[in-house]
Image (cartoon, grey):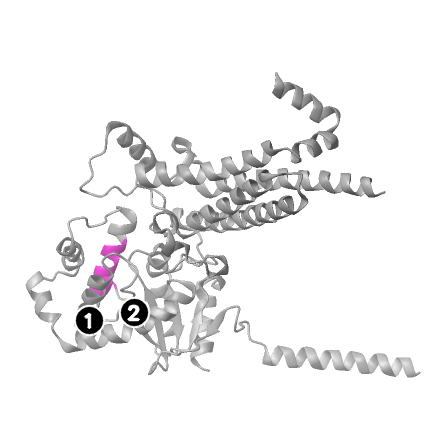
């Protein structure tokens, strides 16, 4: 009699704990899928920051096939903010400045930064293709390097030099410096939600999985 | 002739022969020379002569190989000395196991990078700064050998524009450029760098295990 009662009680407890687990369950866990940054990036609520470098093979793969699709699925839930890492590639500082100029232009014209028509996207893909597909290393120097991006964006060097003087460019580059420390944690690409949660690239299993994780973290 | 004799002895009484071998310098020195030699070839021939820059995991693999080589050298000082042999074994085992893990990671990265249409999810690319065990600042101390200058997953030659290659260099560079990186047989894209390293570490680990097992059997028998 007693054992029957005990068995029923245990069964009930087991069911209850399963239910509780199901309700509170999240498919993602801190430490495995993402890490909470000790030093968060300030003023980054409801953003998806992506730190990249043009010389990083996986940044290229992700930007080509994943980032745009994920940002589109996220819709207006989060704002996409691409950061370029100036400390990694040989022409990192030049690339960062050029990307900042083009991002400002895109923002002024209202072109989304993941759109194929975006000047930033055009230049970035031109660098990726040149570096990763054609083994271009711009041995001719800085002007050689800038030419690749400017040609893709359809901007003249004079136009670029003038636009690069805008104080907003310096502001953006300063803001991107916050990405250096985050990039040191696991390398690039680095997806950061709300400036607080760094997603572990090795745990990203699919486009949909990444989208759900970003949605979940942005709502935290 | 001597080799044939050794082989026959190994087949006839494997435990005794292996025990004899691990008490001699030859195998330990062979391991040190093979591991050290591979690192030397990677640096002098592939990196410097053929302009194939090492990536992050490639420099970790160099580190693992050199730990193995150090283990071999320490044991070879006097393989009959238990303390030296234990230190040598520990280093060699560590190098071999760490090397296998680095090779497996590099192999995953290699596939992800070389198959743009394929799945690259679940693979972490390279870090911005190399991190060695115990936070050893090897990249600062010997940047020529331990600083990653290549991008992860790529090992094809990148010849600077101001360099003129001689005909032999050109022949090798063309061969590895055509295959898109290092392969044991480039024309067939047979066995990439990561797989070749895996084989080297795996073989060493197997020999080490055999030696330690034989050593333990003998030690146990002696105590019985």
Quickly name the residue at label 1: A106
Point 62% across, 39% down: residue: B78
Question: Which one is in front, A54 or B199?
Answer: B199
Quickly name the residue at label 2: A83
* Stretch of the chain drawn in magenta: A116-128
Q: CA distance from mark 1 to mark 2?
A: 15 Å
Asked if the residues shown at circle 1 and circle 2 are in contact, with their CB atoms under 8 angstroms apart, the answer is no
Question: Which one is in front, A16 or A180?
Answer: A180
Question: Which one is in front, B172 or A67?
Answer: B172
Vertical relation: B100 (above or below) A193: above
Report which quarter residue B75 is drawn in.
top right
Query: Considering the numbered disc 1 on the image, is that residue within a helix, a strand or a loop?
Result: helix
Report which quarter residue A117 is drawn in.
bottom left
Query: Considering the numbered disc 2 on the image, is that residue within a helix, a strand or a loop?
Result: strand
Vertical relation: B109 (above or below) A184: above
Q: The disc numbered 1 marks a residue on which chain?
A: A
Q: The disc numbered 2 marks a residue on which chain?
A: A
Point 38% across, 77% down: residue: A195
Q: Nearer the viewer, mark 1 or mark 2?
A: 2
Image position of B53 (left or right of A92): right
Q: Residues within 10 Å of mark 1 (few under 14, many from 20)?
A: some
Q: How far from the left and from the top, in percent, is residue A200?
A: 46, 66
Q: Quadrant of the C terminus of chain B?
A: top right
């Amino acid at each position: 009699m007693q054992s029957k009662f005990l068995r029923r009680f245990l069964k009930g407890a087991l069911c209850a704990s399963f239910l509780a687990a199901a309700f509170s369950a999240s498919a993602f866990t801190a430490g495995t899928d993402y890490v909470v940054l000790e030093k968060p990036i300030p003023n980054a609520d409801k953003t998806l920051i992506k730190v990249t470098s043009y010389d990083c093979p996986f940044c290229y793969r992700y930007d080509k096939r994943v980032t745009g699709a994920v940002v589109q699925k996220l819709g207006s839930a989060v704002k996409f903010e691409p950061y370029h890492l100036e400390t990694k590639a040989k022409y990192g500082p030049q690339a960062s400045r050029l990307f900042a100029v083009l991002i400002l232009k895109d923002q002024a014209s209202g072109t989304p930064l993941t759109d194929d028509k975006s000047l930033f996207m055009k230049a970035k893909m031109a660098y990726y293709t040149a570096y990763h597909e054609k083994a271009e290393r711009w041995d001719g120097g800085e002007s050689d390097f800038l030419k690749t991006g400017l040609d893709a964006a359809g901007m003249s060097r004079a136009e670029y030099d003038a636009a690069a003087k805008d104080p907003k460019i310096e502001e953006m580059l300063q803001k991107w410096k916050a990405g250096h420390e985050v990039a040191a944690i696991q390398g690039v690409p680095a997806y950061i939600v709300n400036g607080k949660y760094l997603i572990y690239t090795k745990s990203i299993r699919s486009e949909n999985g990444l989208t759900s994780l970003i949605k979940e973290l942005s709502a935290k | 002739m001597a080799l044939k004799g050794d082989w026959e002895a190994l087949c006839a009484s494997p435990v005794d022969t292996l025990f004899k071998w691990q008490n001699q310098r030859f195998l330990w020195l062979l391991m040190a020379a093979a591991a050290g030699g591979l690192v030397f070839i990677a640096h002098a021939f592939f990196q410097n002569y053929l302009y194939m820059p090492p990536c992050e995991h490639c420099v970790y693999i160099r580190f693992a190989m050199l730990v193995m080589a150090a283990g071999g050298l320490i044991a070879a000082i006097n393989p009959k000395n238990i303390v030296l042999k234990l230190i040598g074994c520990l280093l060699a085992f560590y190098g071999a196991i760490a090397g296998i893990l680095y090779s497996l990671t590099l192999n995953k990265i290699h596939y992800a990078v070389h198959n743009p249409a394929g799945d690259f999810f679940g693979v972490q690319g390279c870090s911005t700064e190399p991190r060695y065990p115990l936070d050893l600042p090897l990249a600062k101390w010997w940047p020529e050998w331990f600083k990653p200058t290549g991008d992860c997953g790529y090992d094809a030659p990148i010849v600077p524009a101001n360099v003129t290659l001689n005909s032999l260099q050109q022949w090798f560079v063309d061969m590895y450029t055509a295959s898109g990186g290092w392969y044991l047989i480039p024309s067939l894209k047979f066995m990439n760098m990561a797989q070749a390293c895996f084989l080297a570490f795996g073989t060493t680990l197997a020999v080490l295990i055999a030696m330690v097992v034989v050593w333990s059997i003998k030690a146990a028998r002696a105590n019985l």
